[in-house]
Amino acid sequence: GPSEGGMDEDDLTWMAGGDKSPVTPARALASSNRKSGYADDEPLDVRVQIELEGGWKDCSTEEMRAICQQLAKGELVFQIHARGQNYKIDFSGPEGGGQQINISTGKRRRLRILDAREEEAVPEEDVAV
């Protein structure tokens, strides 16, 4: 596995924030090398939720894993296949939320990423100033 020990330089750059866009949960995932694989037996440490008519609902584990695998590779815009449909996932927006677009129907829904242990959204910025 990856070498144990402190964080490497790449982790520190996103945590510092710098002048770049705010560190959103999706960008933090995309920038961290910790979860490069999201192996199929590995517990996910985030939840991905989708906004439906009745409010926010967890996506399926299959979808969460597919999304996390892409984000961990640094992809913020990508496609996944779920429930027999192809979806475009877009986490490139500056506000940090994501969108899921059904490629065949064009239907858009909002996505968000929560810490697996949290009920509310992960704070947009919890970087010390």
Image (tube, rainbow, N blue to C red):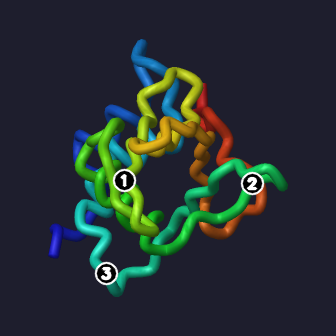
Numbered badge on residue 86: 1
Q: Amino acid at mark 3?
A: Asp
Return the residue at label 3.
40
Decide if residue 43 is on the left or right side of residue 6: right
The residue at 84%/55% (across/down) is: 54
Near mark 1 (Cα within 10 A), the count class, few <14, some 14-19 or many ≥20, is some
The nearer-to-camera label among 3 and 2 is: 2
The residue at 59%/45% (across/down) is: 111
- What is the secondary structure assignment of the residue under circle 3? loop
Q: Amino acid at mark 1?
A: Asn
Q: Amino acid at mark 2?
A: Trp
Decide if residue 119 is on the left or right side of residue 22: right
Numbered badge on residue 56: 2
Q: Is residue 22 above or below residue 76?
A: above
The residue at 58%/25% (across/down) is: 95
- What is the secondary structure assignment of the residue under circle 2? strand
The nearer-to-camera label among 2 and 1 is: 1
**Which residue is situated farthest in the right direction here?**
54
**Which residue is situated farthest in the bottom direction here?**
41
First in sequence: mark 2 or mark 1? 2
- What is the secondary structure assignment of the residue under circle 1? strand
